[in-house]
Every structure is written in structure tokens, then in C-alpha cells.
Amino acid sequence: GGAGAIREAGGTFGKKEAADEERYFRKMQTEQLKTLKTHLDEEITFHQQRMKEHQDAIDIHQKRITELEQKKQA
């Protein structure tokens, strides 16, 4: 018999084996999804920080343009 011989035989042991496998794979999938969500949350945080840095740079440049225009008019 192979590794799944008890499960293939059916009966109570087969049903228990099937339930154990299902529970195992559900747990693995849950852990993988949790890991993926953590990674995506980190990616979002990283990109939000980059957006803030870019917006700060834009604000600085816009301020310089405004100052240059004011000097030009003076």
C-alpha cells in the first residue's frame, strides 16, 4: 500500500485522514494568506512614504517658483 492506503480503504480511518488533510491544507493556506497580506501591507506603507517624500519635494519646488515669481514682479 501507498501513503494513502488507509484513506483509500475508506471507513472511519479514511474519513479521519481526509479531514486531517483538509485541516492541514486549510491551515497552510491561512498562513500563506497571512504572510501575503503582511507583505502587501509593507509594500503599501513603503509606497505611501515615497508618495509623501515626492509630495514634499513638489511643495518645495512650487514654493521656489512662487518666490521667483514674486522677485520678478518686485
Image (spheres, helix red, strand yellow):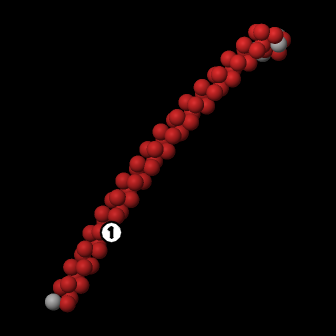
Q: In which quadrant of the rendered view does residue 33 lie?
A: top right
Q: Quadrant of the C terminus?
A: bottom left
Answer with left or right where residue 45 lies relative to residue 8.
left
Q: Quadrant of the N terminus?
A: top right
Q: Which residue is mark 1?
A: 58
Answer with left or right where residue 52 lies relative to residue 63.
right
Q: Residue at x 45, y 49 (%)?
A: 44
Q: Residue at x 27, y 69 (%)?
A: 60
Other residues around mark 1 within 10 Å, as few (<14) / some (14–19) / many (≥20): few
Q: Is 11 above or below relative to 36?
A: above
Q: Secondary structure at mark 1?
A: helix
Q: Is 6 above or below relative to 54?
A: above
Residue type at mark 1: give it.
Ile
Answer with left or right where residue 49 lies relative to residue 34.
left
Inspect this view and state whether residue 6 appears. Answer: no
**Whole-percent x, y for residue 36 in the image:** 53, 39
